[in-house]
Image (spheres, coloured by chain):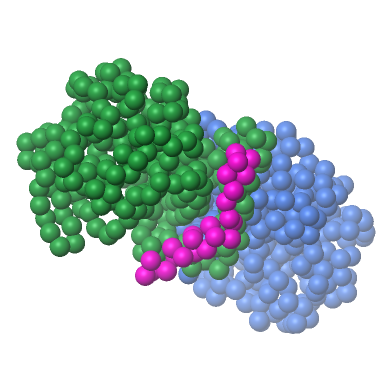
Chain colours: A blue, B green
Amino acid sequence: MNKIAIAGAGAMGGRIGSQIKKAGYDVTLIDTWEEHVNQINEHGLEIETETDTYTIQIPALLPQNVNEAYDLVIILTKSMKSEEMLQTLYDRNALHSDTALLTMMNGLGHDERFSKIVPQTQIFLAVTMWTAGMRGPGKLLLEGTGSIEFQRADGQADHRTEVIHQIFNDAQLNATISDNVFKSIWSKATVNSVVNPLCTILNKTIYEFGSYVHSREMIQPIIDEIVAVAHGRGVELDPQLLLQKIEDSYPKETQGLHYPSMHQDLYNRRYTEVDYLNGQISQYGRELGIPTPNNDMLTHLIHQLEMKWVQ
Amino acid sequence: MNKIAIAGAGAMGGRIGSQIKKAGYDVTLIDTWEEHVNQINEHGLEIETETDTYTIQIPALLPQNVNEAYDLVIILTKSMKSEEMLQTLYDRNALHSDTALLTMMNGLGHDERFSKIVPQTQIFLAVTMWTAGMRGPGKLLLEGTGSIEFQRADGQADHRTEVIHQIFNDAQLNATISDNVFKSIWSKATVNSVVNPLCTILNKTIYEFGSYVHSREMIQPIIDEIVAVAHGRGVELDPQLLLQKIEDSYPKETQGLHYPSMHQDLYNRRYTEVDYLNGQISQYGRELGIPTPNNDMLTHLIHQLEMKWVQ
């Protein structure tokens, strides 16, 4: 895999791309934000960590200026922008018949949407615990540590799996090849589908949400719906573990003082990713005949708030 | 019925009380708001209508100063204050064995709570379409027109029913004796249980709420839950009619430009009446084994917001 592209080079894409670049690989950042792309090309990508600030030179492109093929494309756009990005890359011949297309985005159903454009044998799914922040065009804030789990979407291993693993580990991204990446994706999506919309609707930090004496009664039915839908799709989740994972995020010492990313999106007047979390769960529920009243209601409430804040 | 008391003499209590007083009856206003009570006693109750402003003399009392019995007591406190009010009236011998206790409050379950203190044969239930506003202590804004339906809580007629009917009609309150007051109470409670919490959670006017393209998909499941619970309690509601009633309130020409009363309560940092609407429906659902996920979620969301705004 000589040529690697990061499609969607915001905070997370910038982190993954810069770490792979630092490991000596040929990396190109692709993003629709023109000011960001220009800044990176003219002044490099500036990275602030807990201890250090430095600049790394990486080529950056607008999607419409892509003019070569890549062996590995890591998709890290906003969920609702990913199909458009992939279509542009496809149209510009950025994908060849052996390109590994790896999505590391939050949310559910990306493999299904992508497989309308490229064969499922080329699609890899990843879930990451790394975080990252943007300080402005061309400027990242990279703190903390994380990990990546990934697997080919159809569960099969192939020659590219080991190569991707090597790249990630050269880049110190702490990666493992999963034998059940859907379980990890659904687990993360469950946490996000509970905490994100509720804190957004209520305009509360995670700690403030968890301080309500009946918070467990609020979230248990949402978890139960997701576990039932996942089960209907052949993914077995542990509701007890998910409940604990969510409640572990309440204390101020863990995630409590934060607003979830959906909250940041909405109140910064951007569309949220609710359709890839609760909305996707509702959609799968309808297909399976499994009622998902809580996820339906949360999806509608967020869309109602998008009407108020974004439109 | 020589002596009539209005227990809870805010906007609606003031309207009902002043109209009955104007018809020549002996009316006493009872309220916990000291400044309001003093203002009424010192300067009379000032009433502004569409065409006129006038003052009417009515005696007002704090509950703890009540020292005689009444033949008709109309309860119009906030729902959560009604049991305390009734207990005080009971303790101060304001109720005799033939007193008609009539609740005109919004919400569900008042008859059950009251029947812990007085026999059900003394309890009358009313539902009203009159509205009223407060302009400050001792000052009311009375606009528009309305009606009242009422019935003894156990469905039986008695000598007091006709007398109350006469009093209301002398007071031009446009009253009818219902043969199914629970249906009317549940119908009004359904409308309130849909529009009130949703507009409050979303901080939207009724029009803004209704402008969402999927608003019908949002409210239909809430209505369906309430219809199922009502059915379980022997009250047959028409879901189609309720949907239409709610959707008829969306246009700017009808109720659309208003925020519901629950919204006004919350953002004026007062506890809402959600426990007498969605919360009571959830409670009945639990007793009947009928799932009410939408009403559960709405109740929790409002309580979460009360933590933020009131406490």
Q: Can you tell which quarter of the image residue B229 is in?
A: top right
Given the current orientation, which residue lies at the most extreme left position?
A: B42
Q: Residue at x 75, y 44 (%)?
A: A227
**Picture coordinates of residue B107, whole percent (x, y):** 44, 42
Q: Residue at x 75, y 58 (%)?
A: A286
Viewer-side residue, B102 vs A227: B102
**Picture coordinates of residue A64, whole percent (x, y):** 66, 81
**In this rendering, would B9 be left or right of A255?**
left
Viewer-side residue, B159 vs A34: B159
Residue A253 appears in the rendering:
no
Q: Residue at x 27, y 43 (%)?
A: B167
Q: Residue at x 59, y 48 (%)?
A: B236
**Picture coordinates of residue B252, whole percent (x, y):** 38, 69
- Count all numbered tags in the image, as a single digit: 0
Residue A109 appears in the rendering:
yes
**In this rendering, would B39 be left or right of B17?**
left
**Picture coordinates of residue A15, whole percent (x, y):** 64, 56
Pick the quarter of the image with the C terminus of chain B.
top left
Task: Tell me, yes or no, whether the highlighted magenta stretch contains residue B251.
Answer: yes
Viewer-side residue, A252 vs B266: B266
**In this rendering, would A310 be left or right of A155?**
left
Pick the quarter of the image with the N terminus of chain B.
top left
Above or below residue B191? Residue A102 is below
Task: Tell me, yes or no, whether the highlighted magenta stretch contains residue B243.
Answer: yes
**In this rendering, would A23 be left or right of A161?**
left
Viewer-side residue, A240 vs B243: B243
The stretch in magenta equals: B229-254
